[in-house]
Image (cartoon, rainbow, N blue to C red):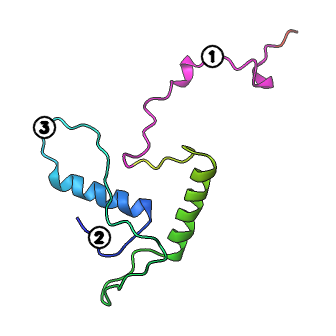
Amino acid sequence: MQLKQPTNDTRHIVRIAKRLLKEIFKLGYRYQKCSLQLGHIQPETQRQQMDLFSVSEQSSDSSILMSTVDHINHRFPKAIAISAAGINNNWQTPVNYLSPRYTTDWGSLPSVK
């Protein structure tokens, strides 16, 4: 699929990937994780003629956000991971199975009277 306008917004690319996945999904087939391949990558400084009648999907806020994410990822590799699947907290341990926090929380220390 070719985008109408170039973008460096990860959220927009993930949104399109999810829409394309919904189009090709067929119930009853086993699927595996895969990667997304991008092509025709151009420097941001290289401008392209836009369609006069389409609304720009990338705002200045988006550009600032993606620049910040890139800066953080450059400084701390693997610090920010954007997930297309969403956040699911089913993996967390139920509270009643947690061990006491004696070494990290003063309030959890047993007291003798």
Q: Which mark is residue 99?
A: 1
- Foreground mark, 3 or 2? 2
Give the residue type that dot 2 points to: Leu
**Residue 88 falls within the magenta-colored stretch:** yes
Position of 16 with respect to 69 (left or right) is: left
Position of 93 with respect to 84 (left or right) is: right
In the image, residue 59 lies at what x, y percent?
A: 48, 76
Residue corresponding to mark 2 = 3
Q: What is the crowding at mark 1: few (fewer than 14 residues within 10 Å), some, or many (at least 20)?
A: few
Residue corresponding to mark 3 = 29
Earlier in the chain: of badge 2 and badge 1, it is: 2
In the image, residue 84 lies at what x, y percent?
A: 38, 49
Give the residue type that dot 3 points to: Tyr
Instruction: Specify start and end residues of the magenta stretch as a single range.
Output: 84-110
Contact between labelled residues 2 and 3, with CB atoms less than 8 Å apart: no
Q: Nearer the viewer, residue 93 or 9?
A: 9
The residue at 59%/52% (across/down) is 74
Contact between labelled residues 1 and 2, with CB atoms less than 8 Å apart: no
The residue at 79%/17% (across/down) is 109
Q: Nearer the viewer, residue 31 or 99?
A: 31
Give the residue type that dot 1 points to: Ser
